[in-house]
Image: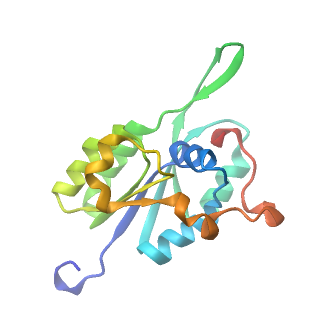
Amino acid sequence: MPKNNKKQTTYAFIDSQNLNLGVREAGWELDFKRFKTYLKEKHQVQKAYLFIGHIAGQESLYKFLEKSGYNLIFKPTLKFKKDKKSIVKGNVDAELVLHTMIQWKNFDKAIIISGDGDFHCLIEYLSNKHKLASIMVPNHRYSSLLRKFAKRIIQISLLKKKLEIDKKKREAFPKDETFR
């Protein structure tokens, strides 16, 4: 606990694409509302920043995520064709690193939610400054660059029973191509 018995402030920084695709690769669908509740109750997260590519027409998804308690940080997306398929790309890595550093003075601990090795330097910096609470990875497949932090890694796929969308109550998460 920080000095002066002050309550520790923990923020989560979430790579939404990595999280969503990684969980789906494990064969299930994350209930983002339940996930936010889990972060608050289990890890005392006061703010959760969700980094997401912005696609026109997906406003209902964005409203749902904001209503669920996420602070959305949008990345403009690029659309292009590859092998006659339409691809939407919105890499959020730079935004996640930048906003973590912008918020630096406002949190005591950070949780990075991604299995992407591109965040290795950020995670190492947070760890060296004693500000890394944990790294949450979607499943067992994550960058080998993160293995040196194995003691701080939490596999979200092991929480499937708690965090999976109840398919009978499908309203929990609007359909959206951003997460495909």
Check the image and report above or below for 7 versus 101.
below
Residue lying furthest top in this view? 83
Is residue 107 at least partly visible in the picture?
A: no
Quadrant of the image for the N terminus? bottom left
Please provide percent x and percent y for residue 134: 34, 62
Task: Look at 83% across and 65% down and name the residue there.
Answer: 168
Please provide percent x and percent y for residue 94: 38, 37
Q: In this view, does 28 lie to the left or right of 12?
A: right
Please provide percent x and percent y for residue 159: 55, 66
Please provide percent x and percent y for residue 6: 25, 82
Check the image and report above or below for 179 versus 100.
above
Task: Look at 75% across and 48% down and name the residue there.
Answer: 175
Question: Which one is in front, 140 or 129?
Answer: 140
Quadrant of the image for the C terminus? top right
Question: Which one is in front, 4 or 123?
Answer: 123
Residue lying furthest bottom in this view? 5
Question: Which one is in front, 156 or 80?
Answer: 156
Q: How many labels does the image show?
A: 0
Check the image and report above or below for 142 versus 82.
below
Q: In this view, does 107 lie to the left or right of 41?
A: left
Residue 82 lies in quadrant: top right
Is residue 49 at least partly visible in the picture?
A: yes
Check the image and report above or below for 11 versus 53.
below
Residue 31 lies in quadrant: bottom right
Q: How is the image coloured?
A: rainbow
Q: In this view, does 109 lie to the left or right of 47?
A: left
Task: Look at 48% across and 69% down and name the residue there.
Answer: 39
Task: Look at 55% across and 42% down and name the residue there.
Answer: 17
Residue lying furthest right in this view? 168
